[in-house]
Image (cartoon, rainbow, N blue to C red):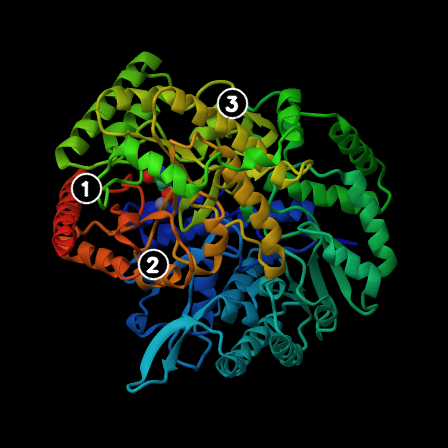
């Protein structure tokens, strides 16, 4: 049996990767120094792999993103980057003014660059798999190149497409047209063949091709195409192992009959792959690479169970390897440096380095090694002990009733009540929550965290910020105010710090894109709120003004989707636990006289399963979790906020969340979002369509913003419309925010007068 691992994090023990890139971008180091640093990182990871597993992957250390590298491999360069000048253009494509679009990689929090295929021709451009293979070879490592496969590459790319009409229009979009997809695949495959050929000539013995897109809903014609692609690629005579992950393959039997030598299956995401192996068997002549160590969650595995599973699998597949279920880059590098975790948690955690060790232990234990078998036994004993339980939280969950998920008054009636109380003008103006997080704010937060200033000093500083932002909003003339979120680093981590059952790490960094890192919290036990989390700041802000100040919470689905979570209770239950903690906060805010509460759910869309058939189940609990935490008094106005543009296909579910007001991002696709409401019969909730794009430093004009409102007015009754930017203002500068909001408020005032004059 072989132990196989892939996708080890790029960051380095001390975030060296991030530093290298950023130093290079700032001009602090030369291109040569950048390359030298990257080579050190390449050798570091090779050594780590070598200690634990049998094959060392190469071509994994991208300078920015592996999809960008794949696009460059096959020469899919948009016209605007045609004069490719090495690293300069590489980073232009990644993060320049006209960079490629960035979007979420499957259902993970990694963001990739979406290749743009403008011409239907490809040619080998940068043979990175070969370069990397040769580099390692010279250093004495025999490696196995990992390459994103042609099917996944095309499925995750966009291509130029001619739209028929009076005048032909060209648009760059996802490749959904069958003929176009087939044509592109046909042209692309020879380039991949060339890469395989060059590798074989250089002495490479095996290649790992990643095709995670085969877990998405895949139609028969697409499977046929995949079959053709691999029939051609296998003609190069270089053994191929295919990798799929994040879910079960969409068609097991088609997958295992592909003409390749080895197949990786994710046996962690759900049981379907395993059931299929048991039901249909596994081809005798192929190697099964069993992905049984979870690459996405940070838990130490119950190796005893895993070992049993391996034994069972070996009945079906005598040629068996053990592997991680999906790339390890969704995890931090190592648990080792964490010193302040809650008692008992550290030994239950396993980040990337620890996962490599687990693979090694499993392999050797499978071979009967005594020491390894002892470790297997230890992991079983540890994980049998109960951990992180809270009886009161469990009791609250089991006694939930239907009415806990339902507000006491239907929308129509509570809307009347709220309008009476709030007495807001037509087109009320507001913001999404955060205001500029200046250098000063960040410095003070660090000073507080590192003990340089006292809690009292810090709190006074935050109060001063709140005073300023309230005065500012009154001066600008906004109708519904916010407290500015100066006390928050990150909208999820802030709540993680305050909730019991949720841990945060000091060094648990994960790349979300480029050099950007974040530290996902770890939900390890039953979640509860030991004391109010936001009350002090919100009530202080409200005490300074007669206008309503919005309570500001992060929703249960977003907290869950942006954290690691325990696996011993269903996701639904974790979501309800978080929701109950938030509900307590909602009640406290109401008690303190807060009339409007916003519960942000920007990650509501992200948790949506990869296959359509699993959608209903997800939305059932996701919608209920939101309803549970937002069961406020009828007179409290509940807002939510979401920021992404693919709104249309989930609008039915969003409606079921039963909020009173929603604000949504619409910077790129206002038309599209408004269309969604046009099609939705009976939409009656208030809505703020972002009238300006907060991602841009440009100050929007009144005219631009008015256009958005006018478009919305064609579809929605005027009483439903709010006026707001499309997301929080935290990344903007005050010099940009001030004129932008003044224009926005003036626009709303003018629009009010115009609309009133018409009646
Ligand atoms: N209330 C948050 C803010 O304004 C919302 C952030 C988000 O949608 N990602 O920053
Ligand atoms: Zn947002």
Instruction: Choose top left, top right, bottom left or bottom right for residue 742.
Output: top left
Of residues 610 and 344, which is closer to you in this image? 610
* Distance CA(mark 3)–CA(mark 1): 34 Å
Q: Which numbered disc flags the more N-terminal residue, 3 or 2?
A: 2
Q: Nearer the viewer, mark 3 or mark 1?
A: 3
Q: Quadrant of residue 374?
A: top right
Where is 408 relative to 148, above or below?
above
The disc, 2 or 1, on the residue closer to the chain's N-terminal end is 2
Question: Mark 2: few, some, or many residues within 10 Å (few <14, many ≥20)?
Answer: some
In the picture of the structure, the residue carrying the numbered disc 2 is: 91
Position of residue 167 measured from the top left corner of the image (x, y, whole percent): 28, 86
In what quadrant of the picture does the N terminus appear?
A: bottom right
Q: Which residue is mark 3?
A: 529
Furthest-bottom residue in view? Answer: 166
User: According to the image, label 1 marks what residue?
Assistant: 737
Q: Is residue 246 visible?
A: no
Q: Earlier in the sequence, mark 3 or mark 1?
A: 3
- Label 2, label 1: how many angstroms apart (C-alpha)? 29 Å
Q: Residues within 10 Å of mark 3 (few under 14, many from 20)?
A: many
Q: Position of residue 29 (x, y in %)?
A: 31, 47
550 vs 694: above or below: above
Indicate the secondary structure of the residue bearing disc 2. helix
> Residue at horizontal 49%, vertical 24%?
584
- Quadrant field for ligand 2: top left
Q: Is residue 240 visible?
A: yes
Q: Answer left or right for 263 relative to 218.
A: right
**What is the x, y in percent for residue 385?**
75, 25
**Helix or strand or loop: what does disc 3 sit on?**
loop
User: 693 or 19: which is nearer to us?
Assistant: 693
């Amino acid at each position: 049996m072989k132990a196989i691992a892939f996708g080890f994090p790029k960051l380095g023990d001390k975030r060296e990767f991030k530093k290298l890139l950023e130093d290079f971008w700032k001009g602090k180091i030369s291109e040569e120094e950048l390359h030298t640093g990257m080579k050190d990182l390449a050798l570091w990871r090779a050594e780590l792999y070598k200690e634990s597993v049998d094959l060392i992957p190469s071509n994994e250390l991208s300078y920015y993103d592996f999809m960008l590298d794949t696009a460059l491999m096959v020469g899919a360069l948009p016209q605007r980057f045609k004069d490719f000048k090495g690293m300069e253009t590489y980073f232009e494509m990644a993060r320049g003014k006209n960079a490629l679009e960035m979007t979420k990689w499957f259902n993970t929090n990694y963001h990739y660059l979406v290749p743009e295929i403008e011409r239907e021709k490809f040619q080998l451009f940068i043979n990175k798999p070969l370069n990397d293979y040769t580099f390692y070879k010279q250093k004495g490592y025999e490696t196995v190149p990992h390459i994103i496969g042609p099917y996944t590459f095309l499925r995750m790319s966009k291509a130029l497409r001619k739209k028929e009409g009076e005048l032909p229009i060209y648009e760059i979009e996802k490749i959904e047209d069958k003929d176009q997809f087939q044509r592109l695949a046909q042209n692309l495959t020879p380039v991949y063949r060339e890469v395989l050929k060059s590798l074989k000539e250089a002495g490479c013995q095996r290649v790992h091709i990643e095709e995670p897109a085969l877990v998405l809903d895949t139609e028969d014609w697409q499977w046929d195409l995949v079959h053709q692609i691999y029939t051609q690629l296998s003609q190069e005579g270089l053994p191929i192992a295919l990798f799929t992950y994040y879910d079960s393959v969409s068609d097991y039997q088609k997958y295992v009959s592909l003409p390749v030598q080895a197949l990786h299956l994710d046996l962690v995401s759900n049981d379907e792959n395993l059931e299929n192996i048991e039901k249909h068997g596994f081809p005798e002549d192929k190697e099964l690479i069993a992905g049984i160590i979870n690459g996405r969650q940070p838990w130490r595995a119950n190796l005893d169970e895993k070992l049993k599973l391996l034994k069972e699998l070996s009945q079906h597949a005598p040629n068996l390897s053990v592997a991680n279920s999906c790339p390890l880059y969704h995890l931090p590098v190592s648990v080792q440096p964490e010193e302040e975790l809650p008692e008992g948690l550290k030994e239950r955690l396993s980040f990337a380095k620890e996962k490599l060790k687990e693979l090694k232990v499993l392999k050797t234990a499978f071979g009967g090694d005594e020491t390894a078998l002892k470790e297997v036994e230890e992991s079983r004993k540890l994980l049998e002990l109960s951990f992180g339980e809270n009886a009161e939280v469990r009791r609250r969950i089991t006694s939930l009733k239907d009415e806990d998920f339902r507000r006491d008054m239907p929308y129509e009636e509570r809307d009347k009540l709220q309008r009476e109380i709030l007495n807001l003008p037509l087109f009320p103006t507001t913001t999404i929550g955060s205001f500029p997080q200046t250098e000063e704010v960040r410095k003070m937060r660090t000073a507080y965290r590192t003990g340089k200033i006292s809690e009292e000093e810090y709190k006074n500083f935050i109060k001063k910020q709140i005073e300023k932002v309230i005065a500012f909003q009154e001066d600008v003339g906004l109708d519904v105010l916010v407290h500015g979120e100066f006390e928050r680093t990150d909208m999820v981590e802030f709540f993680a710090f305050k909730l019991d059952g949720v841990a945060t790490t000091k060094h648990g960094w994960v790349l979300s894109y480029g050099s950007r890192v974040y530290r996902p919290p770890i939900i390890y036990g039953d979640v509860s709120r030991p004391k109010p989390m936001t009350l002090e700041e919100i009530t202080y802000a409200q005490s300074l003004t007669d206008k309503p100040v919005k309570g500001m919470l992060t929703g249960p689905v977003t907290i869950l989707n942006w954290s690691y979570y325990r696996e011993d209770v269903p996701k639904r239950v974790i979501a309800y636990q978080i929701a109950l903690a938030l509900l307590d906060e909602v009640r406290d805010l109401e008690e303190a006289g807060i009339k409007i509460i916003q519960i942000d759910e920007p990650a509501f869309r992200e948790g949506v399963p990869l296959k359509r058939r699993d959608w209903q189940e997800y939305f059932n609990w996701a919608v209920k979790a939101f309803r549970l935490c937002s069961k406020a008094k009828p007179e409290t106005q509940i807002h939510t906020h979401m920021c992404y543009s693919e709104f249309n296909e989930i609008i039915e579910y969003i409606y079921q969340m039963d909020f009173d007001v929603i604000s949504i991002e619409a910077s790129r696709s206002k038309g599209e979002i408004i269309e969604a409401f046009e099609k939705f019969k009976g939409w009656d909730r208030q809505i703020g369509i972002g009238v300006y794009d907060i991602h841009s430093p440009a100050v929007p004009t009144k005219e631009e913003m008015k256009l958005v409102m006018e478009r919305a007015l064609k579809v929605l009754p005027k009483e439903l419309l709010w006026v707001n930017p499309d997301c929080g203002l935290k990344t903007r500068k005050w010099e940009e925010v001030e004129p932008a909001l003044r224009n926005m408020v003036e626009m709303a005032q003018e629009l009010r007068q115009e609309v009133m004059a018409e009646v």
